[in-house]
Amino acid sequence: MAETLNEIERRVLGVLIEKSLAQPQYYPMTLNAITAGCNQKSNREPAMELDEDAVWNTLEVLRAGGLVSRLLPAGASRVERFKHEAKAFFGWEKPQRAVMAELLLRGPQTVGELRTRCARMYPFETTEAVAATLEGLCQCDPPRVAMLPRAPGQSAARYAHRLYPPHEWAVVEPTLATTAPAPPPPPATSTATEMQQLRAQVEALQDEVAALRAEVAGLRRGP
């Protein structure tokens, strides 16, 4: 099962990994919080409108496959919580988990995009560090990432995760490219870098507000 994941399974796993790194104070997560994370308008491609039944069923599938664990209520808590098992299952450390979370949540991206967007989960110091992480994911057995061929007009190669089912992968990558990582893009101008940093900060704040709203909703609803 873990060799490929459908669209909802990828979204749920991506949310759990993302929140565990970016907002550990709200992790492990309730069903309500996971659903809110799946339906976020920021940091998601495509946008989704999932209900709790769909998320619950997906969590059960992931749990049966060893990718998710369920924590029963304990102490003052009155709700079940869930956590991912990506490190135990795949052997991914924080850099790999951050990159994979972004690819699961947003689809194919360039090295530069990944460095900026991963900052809220894991601060890569250089684009070379991101490229090295991608190379490791490309070369593991089986590969978890592949480089896509550059489309006309693109100045940088994009990378995609390899957890797509075959029929979806055929759309993402009609002709498999080499998995060797491309050289890192040239440094961005200071203005562009500042804008990327501001955008990442705004997205992180949006994530935190969504998590807080989900937690409050869960508390109001009770057991």
Image (cartoon, rainbow, N blue to C red):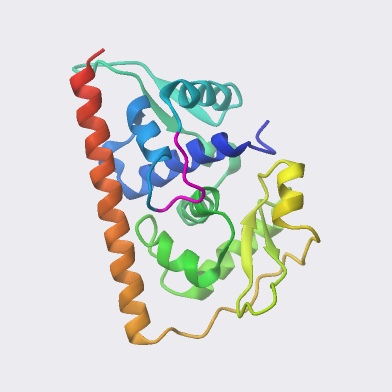
Question: Which of the 4 image quadrants contains residue 62?
Answer: top right
* Residue 127 image point, x, y percent: 49, 74
Q: Is residue 107 left or right of residue 210?
A: right
Tell me what residue is drawn at x 50 percent, y 49 percent: 105
Tell me what residue is drawn at x 58 percent, y 68 percent: 132
Q: Is residue 176 above or below residue 10?
A: below
Question: Which of the 4 image quadrants contains residue 219?
Answer: top left
Determine if the magenta segment contains residue 44.
yes
Q: Is residue 12 above or below residue 121?
A: above
- Magenta range: 43-49
**Nearer to us in this view, 71 or 104:** 104
Q: Is residue 42 left or right of residue 170?
A: left
Q: Quadrant of the C terminus?
A: top left
* Residue 13 image point, x, y percent: 50, 38
Q: Looking at this view, name the residue that lies furthest to the top.
A: 223
Tell me what residue is drawn at x 63 percent, y 72 percent: 157
* Residue 191 image point, x, y percent: 32, 84
**Nearer to us in this view, 196 or 136:** 196
Q: Is residue 210 above or below residue 137?
A: above
Q: Is residue 81 left or right of residue 113?
A: left
Tell me what residue is drawn at x 32 percent, y 66 percent: 199
> Magenta span: helix, strand or loop, mainly?
loop
